Image (cartoon, rainbow, N blue to C red):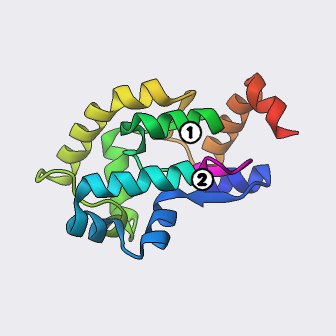
Amino acid sequence: MGKSLAMTLGWPFIDADSELVRTCGLSISEMVDRHGWKAFREKERSVIKRICGSDRHVVATGGGAVLDSNNVKQMKRSGVLVWLRARPESVEKRMLKDEHTQDFRPPLTSKGLLEEIEATVTIRKPYYETAMNFFVDTDDAGVNEVCDIVLEKLNDMEMFSSNIS
């Protein structure tokens, strides 16, 4: 979705998780296994801070980026935060289709995948609600439709309109 939005806007796309993997030389799963979640979150904070120094980029972050208030402050200062909201069943289906899930999304609990997603969404929902400028429900929408909705909402925002020219 982020890549499509970036292409439409004519802006570069940055995936924060991919950037973190590139700079650290380890997959997220390897990083968490070797150094723990705390070290991962510290590296994630550093990458997000650096990315937020860039102008006119579309950035995709990992779902846990909003758990760190410093990340949220940096991201809100530098742009618009969009929560691409989905039901746990939709998230599970997407994760099972994604061949990189194991590298980019290490297990957070010892529960089954759907149970873990449900628990994670429940815990993170207030963080997403606090951080976001707006959300888009993505369950029954294709990438192009989600992009159109995001663009429509962005165009309605005065701060975005003044920054796009």
Range of the magenta residues? 52-59
Which residue is at 69% across, 40% downward? 148
Which residue is at 26% across, 45% downward? 117
Any mark on residue 46, and which? none
> In the figure, 74 relative to 62: above or below?
above
| Residue at the limit of the structure toward the bottom, as seen here | 25
Any mark on residue 75, and which? 1
In the image: residue 41, left or right of residue 7 = left
Q: Amino acid at mark 2?
A: Ile
**Most frequent secondary structure within the magenta stretch:** loop
Q: Where is residue 25? Give x, y as percent.
A: 41, 76
Secondary element at image label 2: helix
Quarter containing the C terminus = top right
Tally the numbered discs. 2
Q: Which residue corresponds to mark 2? A: 51
In the image: residue 128, left or right of residue 123 = right
Q: Where is residue 119? Give x, y as percent.
A: 21, 38
Q: Where is residue 107? Give x, y as percent.
A: 22, 57
| Residue at the limit of the structure toward the left, as seen here | 110
In the image: residue 39, left or right of residue 46 = left
> In the figure, 158 relative to 44: above or below?
above
| Residue at the limit of the structure toward the right, as seen here | 165
Which residue is at 67% across, 55% downward? 4
In the image: residue 55, left or right of residue 81 = right
Tell me if residue 126 can be seen. Answer: yes
Q: Is residue 134 magenta?
A: no
Quarter residue 160 falls in = top right
Which residue is at 64% across, 38% downward? 78
The mark nearer the N terminus, 2 or 1, is: 2
Q: Is residue 56 magenta?
A: yes
* 74 vs 141, nearest the viewer: 74
Q: Amino acid at mark 1?
A: Met
